Image (cartoon, rainbow, N blue to C red):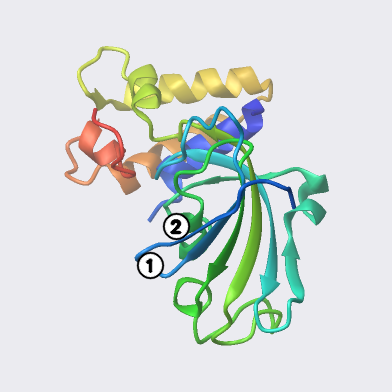
């Protein structure tokens, strides 16, 4: 994962969350009514994805009604797989469910009901009609610790007091910007820092506690 991707997801975590193979086939249905067909599992199937992880995947989307393709990630972003955080609404809920407990190299075909996709309103200027059941073919490439992991918090928390001060976050941002190799006006840094505290310091004490930071709630701090 490039530095640019890492920095984008770090900033999103603070600022924007208020966002065919021949193998053994196995079918499953979750309590949320997402039908999952596992098409391929590698010999070493680890780590398994969980809420808050940063995933890298390709997926194609089809309408169940007629099999027409409405989306292909390989035609986006110069063909690079998509990066997104699992379980926080960056993809439709059905995909969040369908891609849980996947490992790198695994492939799945999933069927998602309208209630866990785009519902009565549809999407994409009619490409996805109202009340459409969707089918996705998914290939997962990477499972990384998300930007709200214990490791990320510990890296920023220089004095290990389980809370992040303005100075600590400011220092971390400056280091990341320096690694990026691009100069940024001080006002940009100050604006990002102010926005981080506005959206994350819920009790207004001037610190971001481990509880306030850990919005994904899949690790203990």
Disc 2 + disc 1, Cβ < 8 Å? yes
Pick whichever, 122 or 101, lies toward us.
101
Give the crowd class for mark 1: few <14, some 14-19, many >=20 residues within 10 Å: some
Residue under the point 73% across and 48% down:
21
Residue under the point 34% across and 44% down:
216
Residue 115 higher or lower than 120, as above or below:
above
Give the side of residue 13 with respect to residue 104, left or right: left
Give the side of residue 218 with respect to residue 101, left or right: left
Q: Secondary structure at mark 1?
A: loop
Q: CA distance from mark 2 to mark 1?
A: 8 Å
Q: Position of residue 124 (x, y in %)?
A: 67, 76
Question: Residue 182 is drawn in which quadrant?
Answer: top right
Pick whichever, 162 or 77, lies toward us.
77
Residue under the point 50% across and 56% down:
98
Pick whichever, 29 or 114, lies toward us.
29
Residue under the point 53% across and 76% down:
118
Q: Position of residue 129 (x, y in %)?
A: 63, 85
Residue 187 seen in this snapshot: no
Q: Quadrant of the N terminus?
A: top right
Q: Which residue is mark 2?
A: 97
The disc placed on residue 32 is 1
Pick whichever, 161 or 91, lies toward us.
91
Residue 197 higher or lower than 172, as above or below:
below
Q: Position of residue 26 (x, y in %)?
A: 54, 54
């Amino acid at each position: 994962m490039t530095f640019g991707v890492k920095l984008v997801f770090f900033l999103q975590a603070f600022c924007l969350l208020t966002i065919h193979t021949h193998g053994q086939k196995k079918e499953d249905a979750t309590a949320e009514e997402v039908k999952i067909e596992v098409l391929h599992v590698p010999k070493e199937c680890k780590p398994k994805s969980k809420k808050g992880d940063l995933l890298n995947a390709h997926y194609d989307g089809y309408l169940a009604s007629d099999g027409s393709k409405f989306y292909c990630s390989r035609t986006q972003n110069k063909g690079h797989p998509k990066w997104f955080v699992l379980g926080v609404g960056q993809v439709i809920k059905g995909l969040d469910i369908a891609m849980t407990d996947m490992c790198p190299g695994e492939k799945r075909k999933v069927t998602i009901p309208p209630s866990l996709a785009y519902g009565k309103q549809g999407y994409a200027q009619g490409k996805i009609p109202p009340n459409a059941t969707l089918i996705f073919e998914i290939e997962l490439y990477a499972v990384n610790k998300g930007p709200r992991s214990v490791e990320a918090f510990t890296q920023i928390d220089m004095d290990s007091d389980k809370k992040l001060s303005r100075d600590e976050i400011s220092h971390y941002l400056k280091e990341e910007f320096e690694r990026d190799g691009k100069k940024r006006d001080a006002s940009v840094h100050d604006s990002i820092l102010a926005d981080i505290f506005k959206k994350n310091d819920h009790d207004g004490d001037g610190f971001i506690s481990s509880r306030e930071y850990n919005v994904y709630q899949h690790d203990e701090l």
